[in-house]
Image (spheres, helix red, strand yellow):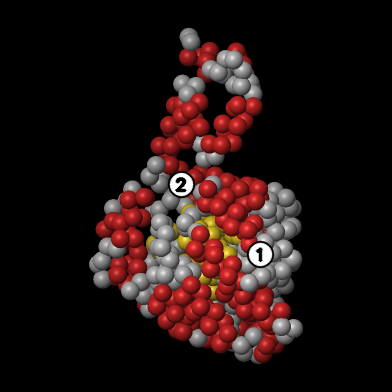
């Protein structure tokens, strides 16, 4: 049975006990929240790792995307990126590989991962079709369902499935022109297939089949936002909202089938629209856990989009987002390197922690208070220990260290803390 099915039966699973202990919450409360669909524990029955929970009342989680591309395929590099992401605090990894032996890459990532693994199954199918010289319109829905089942068997914990890109939701883009059109790879692929074949999205049309596969392996569905805005000017338009309404329907159907489900959100969005969007999404999707990319609050900072995403991610998490997908400095430019991965994870980690302070997540305010007291006492070791990135804090301090270690090179003997304390 899935975690949801067991929660509905009143069973507190070992996974629930682990999450409850890590989050410092009551296990019985956690079970109730899982039963209500407000929290999920993405864990495939074929994947063993230290589980984490995502949802209301828990600490904000972080995902890091890794994966090869047709332009750059080096599995060793991706494994190293995976290790860096986990080292600096990622709670999940998505393998978005589109180059090389995709199944072998995914198999190795699952085998070496200490965190939950997510995928976008349509990427692999589309990559194969294009490699064979075919068009996307020639994609056979059977191949897509076979890929979903195969990845579930391999141990994938959550899958992004763009079930809300339908003939109906696409129709709302016809008379509401966008600046950037569709920027989701999965969304664009499915639009191409729907338009060229004049048929409905098979993931929507055969959604019950998707649910059966996911229930069998306890794969958490991450309902993809295929029509998410790709520029601030496109935020909260008809297409985005039309897809969201369909996703709300699909959340209810997943829960009724005993399948864990979360929902993905935008995207690019001006700062003043984030709060409203998060509340709308939570309302329409009956408080399902929300997984957001960014949101990116400006479009004109390529090379610094990890900062842009952290700004939007903090506000999103304060207002209901439960899971932040990191954005790296390479966003919109190139495949991220190892340092980009670290920068992206740290930016999202700062955003998540900042939001958790406001949400009063257990341990978040206490951590800040400990480091503040350590600053007052000029207790460098405690400061390093409680820092989100102890390595960089220790490194920068050591670079400027003098024989007197009770102050830093910024203020020297004019140190306000030192002089105030000596009065």
Decide which of 279, 201 is in the foreground and name it.
201
**The disc label shown at residue 68, or none:** 1
Residue behind mark 2: 356
Instruction: Name the residue: 39% across, 54% down.
Output: 57
The answer to whether residue 326 of the structure is visible from this angle is: no
Decide which of 86, 301 is in the foreground and name it.
86
Q: Position of residue 285 (x, y in %)?
A: 46, 69
Q: Position of residue 298 (x, y in %)?
A: 69, 53
382 above or below 331?
above
Tell me the distance, in whole angstroms, between the alpha carbons under discs 1 and 2.
33 Å
Of tags 1 and 2, which is closer to the observer? 1
**The disc label shown at residue 16, or none:** none
- Asked whether, in this view, residue 290 is left or right of residue 187, the answer is left
Decide which of 359, 327 is in the foreground and name it.
327
Instruction: Name the residue: 69% across, 73% down.
Output: 176
117 above or below 305?
below
Q: Residues within 10 Å of mark 1 (few under 14, many from 20)?
A: many
- Asked whether, in this view, residue 18 is left or right of residue 419, the answer is left
Identify the image quadrant of residue 1.
bottom left
Instruction: Name the residue: 62% across, 52% down.
Output: 341
374 above or below 261?
above
**Which residue sits furthest top?**
423
Q: Position of residue 218 (x, y in %)?
A: 40, 72
Q: Residues within 10 Å of mark 2 (few under 14, many from 20)?
A: many
**Which residue sits furthest bottom?**
198
155 above or below 33?
below
């Amino acid at each position: 049975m899935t975690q949801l099915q067991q929660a509905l039966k009143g069973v507190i699973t070992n996974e629930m006990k682990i999450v409850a202990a890590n989050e410092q919450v009551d296990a019985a409360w956690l079970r109730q929240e899982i039963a209500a669909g407000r929290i999920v524990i993405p864990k495939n029955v074929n994947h063993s790792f230290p589980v984490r929970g995502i949802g209301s009342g828990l600490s904000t989680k972080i995902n890091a995307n890794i994966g090869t591309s047709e332009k750059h395929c080096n599995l060793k590099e991706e494994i190293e990126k995976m290790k860096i992401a986990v080292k600096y605090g990622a709670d999940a990894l998505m393998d978005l590989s589109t180059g090389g032996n995709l199944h072998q890459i995914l198999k190795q990532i699952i085998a070496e991962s200490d965190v939950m693994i997510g995928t976008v199954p349509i990427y692999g199918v589309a990559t194969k079709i294009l490699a064979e010289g075919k068009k996307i319109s020639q994609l056979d829905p059977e191949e897509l369902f076979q890929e979903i089942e195969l990845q579930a068997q391999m141990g994938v914990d959550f899958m992004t499935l763009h079930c809300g890109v339908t003939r109906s939701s696409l129709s709302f883009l016809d008379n509401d022109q966008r600046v950037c059109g569709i920027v989701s790879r999965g969304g664009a692929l499915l639009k191409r297939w729907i338009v060229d074949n004049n048929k409905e999205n098979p993931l929507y049309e055969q959604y019950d089949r998707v649910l059966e596969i996911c229930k069998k392996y306890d794969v958490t569905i991450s309902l993809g936002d295929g029509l998410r805005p790709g520029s601030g000017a496109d935020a909260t338009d008809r297409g985005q909202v039309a897809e969201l309404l369909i996703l709300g329907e699909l959340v209810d159907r997943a829960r009724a089938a005993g399948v864990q489900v979360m929902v993905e959100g935008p995207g690019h969005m001006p700062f003043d629209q984030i709060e409203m969007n998060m509340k709308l999404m939570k309302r329409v999707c009956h408080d399902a856990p929300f997984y957001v990319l960014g949101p990116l609050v400006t479009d004109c900072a390529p090379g610094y989009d990890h900062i842009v995403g952290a700004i939007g991610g903090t506000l999103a998490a304060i207002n209901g987002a439960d899971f932040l997908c990191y954005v790296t400095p390479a966003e919109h430019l190139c495949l991220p390197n190892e340092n980009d991965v670290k920068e992206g994870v740290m930016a999202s980690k700062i955003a998540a922690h900042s939001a958790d302070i406001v949400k009063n997540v257990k341990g978040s305010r206490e951590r800040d208070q400990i480091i503040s007291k350590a600053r007052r006492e000029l207790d460098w070791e405690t400061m390093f220990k409680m820092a989100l990135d102890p390595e960089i804090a220790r490194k920068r301090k050591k670079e400027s260290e003098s024989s007197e270690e009770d102050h830093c090179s910024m203020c020297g003997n004019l140190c306000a803390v030192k002089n105030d304390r000596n009065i």
